[in-house]
Image (tube, grey):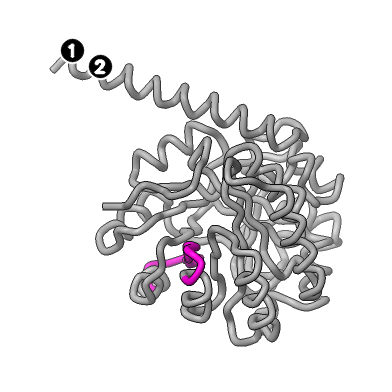
Amino acid sequence: MTAPFPFKMRLPVISAPMFLVSGPELVIAAAKAGIGGAFPTPNCRTSAELDAWMGQITDALSPDNGPWVANLITHSTNARLADDLALVAEYKPQIVITALGSPKPVMETVKSYGGLVFADVVNMALARKAAAAGVDGMACISAGAGGHTGHLNPFAFISAIRDFFDGYIAVGGGIADGAGVAGAIAAGADLVYMGTRFLAATESRAQDGYKAMVVDSGPDDLLVSPAITGTNASWLIPSLVAAGLDPKELSAPVTRDYSGDAAHKRWQDIWAAGQGLQSIDAVLPTAQIVDRLEAEYWTAIDRFAAHSRAMEMTS
């Protein structure tokens, strides 16, 4: 049985870490709005910049705010991992989410100050490895997620992991409104990992054209392809066309590339998004987005309660 979540939150939502999009402004706004705010450490090009970001975040937040979250790449190719981990030990984010590698390198550091370690997982094999490593939770990237996406239905993913894991589950993939949050919690998740919904937030670092495209697009404007990085990712078709690419004639690169200047340029010029686009109709401050999510969440819960009462009356 999952223990009660130890951090104060208005809604069980984390604004997911988005490459080149999530910065301290979005993290702070999310936490102050009462949800979790996350950013990937590779968004900082140097350890000195990461030091400044973490200092800015911790100076701005209080224990009454939602948790802030650092997303670390633990793959052996991350030459900066030791330096980033030293900053984690100094600034103590409440949650550290590991990606593209084993969570083991961060466990001792994060647990020493009482933080939680989540592992980013996209399939059952990775989920079992994360459970064996002793993580506190998993960020389950499902079908419908933006950027590097999973292939499993979020409800099926939650159910399968619950067969062997009683830690925290954060699920992401196509969930962009409060009703979806309520549905994920009812299905056994503890948190919802929500990226696309915050792409068009005022505090997002997405380019203005990117935000406008997110507002103007829907689920049919997406293409899942390995052509840009070598791994399946969900891309906005209009951005592919604007970059001079034919969505019908894409071929995957020979090698995968997640970092470095080339990757930065690709993600700057070609824009990712998930299937929750239909819920986004304007560029809004994060606080207003969370207000809307909360209203939708409680409306969904009230609808479920009314449905349950009606079923009882007919049984």
Which quadrant of the figure contains the C terminus? Answer: top left
- Which residue is drawn at the image coordinates 50% and 42% (left, top)? 8
The amino acid beneath tag 2 is Arg
Instruction: Estimate the x, y position of residue 123 in percent, counting from the top left.
Output: 43, 67
User: Mark 2 and 1 residues: CB-CB less than 8 Å, in contact?
Assistant: yes
Instruction: Estimate the x, y position of residue 32 in percent, counting from the top left.
Output: 66, 40
Q: Is residue 261 above or below residue 154?
A: below
**Residue 246 visible, this angle:** no
Q: Residues within 10 Å of mark 2 (few under 14, many from 20)?
A: few
Disc 1: which residue: 313
Instruction: Estimate the x, y position of residue 75 in percent, counting from the top left.
Output: 58, 81
- Which residue is drawn at the image coordinates 82% and 76% (left, top)? 261
Residue 309 marker: 2
Q: Is residue 129 above or below residue 313?
A: below
User: At numbered mark 1, what does the secondary structure look like: helix, strand or loop?
Assistant: helix
Report the magenta residues as a range.
112-125
User: At numbered mark 2, what does the secondary structure look like: helix, strand or loop?
Assistant: helix
> Can you name the residue that lies furthest to the left here?
315
Residue 195 marker: none
Q: Is residue 152 left or right of residue 22?
A: left
- Mark count: 2
Distance between the Cα atoms at labels 2 and 1? 6 Å
Is residue 117 rendered magenta in the image? Answer: yes
- Which residue is drawn at the image coordinates 46% and 52% (left, top)? 171
Q: Is residue 24 above or below residue 296?
A: below
